[in-house]
Amino acid sequence: MTVQELPQLPDRARAFRWGYYAVRLLLVAVLLGLAAGLPGGGLGREKFLYREGDIARERIVAPYDFRVQKDETVLRREQQQAAAAVPPVFVVDGRISADTFQRFSMFQERVHQVLEETPAAGEDRAAKLRALGVPLTPEAAQALAEPGRARRVLRELGVVLHELFGAGVVAEKRSGLLLGYRSVNVREGESELPRPAGLLYDRREALQRIEQRAGTALRGDPLAQRLISELAGPFVQPNVVYDRAETEYRRVQAQGVVPTMVGFVKKDELIVDANQRIEGETLLKLRSLRDVELARRNRSDFLLPPLARALLMLLIIAAFVTYLRMELPAVYRDNAMLAMFTLLTGVVMAVAQVMVGTFGLSEFTVPLALAPLVVASLMEKRPALVFTLFLAVIAMAVVELRAHFVPVAVLGGVTAVYSVSRLRHRWHFARATFIIAIANLAAILAWDLARSGSASVIARDALYGALNAFLATSIAFLLLPLVEHVLGLTSDITLLELSDLNRPLLRRLQLEAPGTYHHSMVVGSLAEAGAEAIGANSLLARVSAYYHDIGKLAKPEYFAENEPASSRSLHERLTPSMSALVVRSHIAEGLEMARAARLPRAVRNSIPEHHGTMVIAFFYHKALEQDPMARREEYCYPGPRPRSKETAILMLADGVEGASRALAEPTPSRIRGLVTRIIDERVQEGQLDECGLTLSELAKIREAFIPVLTAIFHVRAPYPDDPRRRPKADADLRRESS
């Protein structure tokens, strides 16, 4: 009976991935917004940016007429002096004087009324006087109860109050000065006259004046003297008030009168010649010209420069994306990689803007090398090199840096790529700092010598180059863990940490599945050798081999390498389909364990890809013996096929190591034949179609596998037996056999 195979259903049309493309559009929008939003201005600000004593880098001629601004420090000092020369303004408040005299008159009338209406012998006269609203002690009230003394005290107090308010009472004076001035302007009504501070009284001086007057006028009556001092307190109030608003206005006006210009420069006038020392007057002209340039640009260049920078950024993005799509399609399809490029571009441009555009430092200090340091630590060298070239161009254009920034930045960036090509320890960043600094110094020295720079200029630029290298490696060192964690990428340092055999998963593998552990170690050695042979990431290949079979921890006894030699296989009690299901489940179990242990994506990918979509041959053939109609798909691994060179090498190493255990006599020639057969089978099955390996690279991998396997399965010469122990050994052997 023949069964006609039904045609396969056509693949469903893939739904448009809105989220995937939305992320890409967002990354492009971020870069365009950054290019348009940065103020730039590095070139314009640096052109006329000098300090006194510097040597002019070029001949500068006035492009138009402009006024020379006074030095900012000198102008501020003169304005402060002009403001300080304006005395404070005080105003005589007649309402305070009138109110005080009215209260005193009312108090005087009530005192006389109490004295007239209350008998002298009455005990309540003092009590009534204390109730008139002016605080009095009992002694003062008894003294005021005497009519003659009361008339003398009130008369003298009225006279002295008129004297004090006529001279003027202020709130406070210190050391004879009023607000720090010996003379102030006092305004009364429409008139204003300067008045020495010594002619005005503050409250303390006014009370002292009252005591002196009482001592003279009321000599011989101590009670009256104390009484007048006590009565004066509530009636002495400041009637000359400080007018802060008017004073500040006059001082601002005085500052505005100070001239801000010290000269005028005509168009085409020579300001300074090249290689001349910048002196005081020349420096003022250069600063004034720089300020005028910035003001003119801010007024006229509002819309077009941001649009131009955004357009240039768009062109650079298009060129770089085209390169990735043609040369590195896996990177082009990975949004995490594109986000990393976007983040690094933003960091470099922001740092360049702050250092050059804001603080006016040299372009030699811009740490562009931080970007290739991070990229080369996370992926191969090619995209890092191309990214360095594009980044140098766009940073120069957007931040408006001078042209000599590009060769120095590119040389430092390219050096940075190769300085971390084999990043194995944290201290390698220190080595990278030294190497990048040497490259920067060489480029800067070549530039300065071509311009015949002085020794001081060369030394200064050399320090800038060293600072550049230090900042680049420092920022890269801080950014690398952040990029790895947020974007799910993996550096060699993280892989080194994962290669520690004392990590929990590997310890469990060693204790619970020792056969799988040994298998993983051997596969790691093979994968590392194969990766080194073709220039792939050997560390990633070895670490991936360590973790590729961690899923077997769920059921270690169902895998041949963990079965004791003397026991029967557990699969003898299972059907072939159930055995295939158990074996295939270690892929899903491994992925679950890898996610729980937070293994990076590059290592997790090795778990499903190292088997690809290969068939579980032993159980498939066993199933065919029982049922010729058994479906092959039910006995295949879920995949996907290897999508990187490292996982493809791991697939080959895994297959070679497993097959080599079945060799009866593992001679070099048999090992070579075995390796060749395994590689050919994987190629014929199409398992290596998506990994990018070439035939020449497969040949190199094969030649790298053979010495490792030969060393593992080397034959040792038998140890000679001790004749004295032979009889005992023979007896033990006969006893065991019986």
Image (spheres, grey):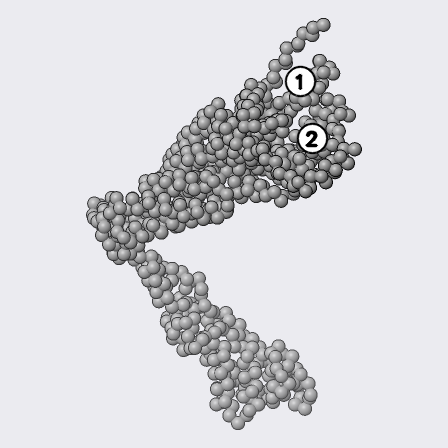
Secondary structure beneath dot 1 equals helix
The residue at the far top in this view is 1
Decide: few, some or many residues near mark 1? Use Cα within 10 Å; few <14, some 14-19, many ≥20.
some
Question: Which comes sooner in the sequence, label 1 or label 2?
Answer: 2
What numbered label is drawn on residue 559?
A: 2
Quickly name the residue at label 1. 632
Decide: few, some or many residues near mark 2? Use Cα within 10 Å; few <14, some 14-19, many ≥20.
some
Classify residue 710 by image quadrant. top right
Amino acid at the residue labelled 1: Arg
Q: Which residue is depicted at the point 60% across and 88% down?
A: 143
Question: Of tags 1 and 2, which is closer to the observer?
Answer: 2
Viewer-closest of 282 and 656 = 656
The residue at the far bottom in this view is 220
Q: Which residue is depicted at the point 42% across and 39% down?
A: 418
Amino acid at the residue labelled 2: Phe
Viewer-closest of 240 and 129 = 240
Classify residue 680 by image quadrant. top right
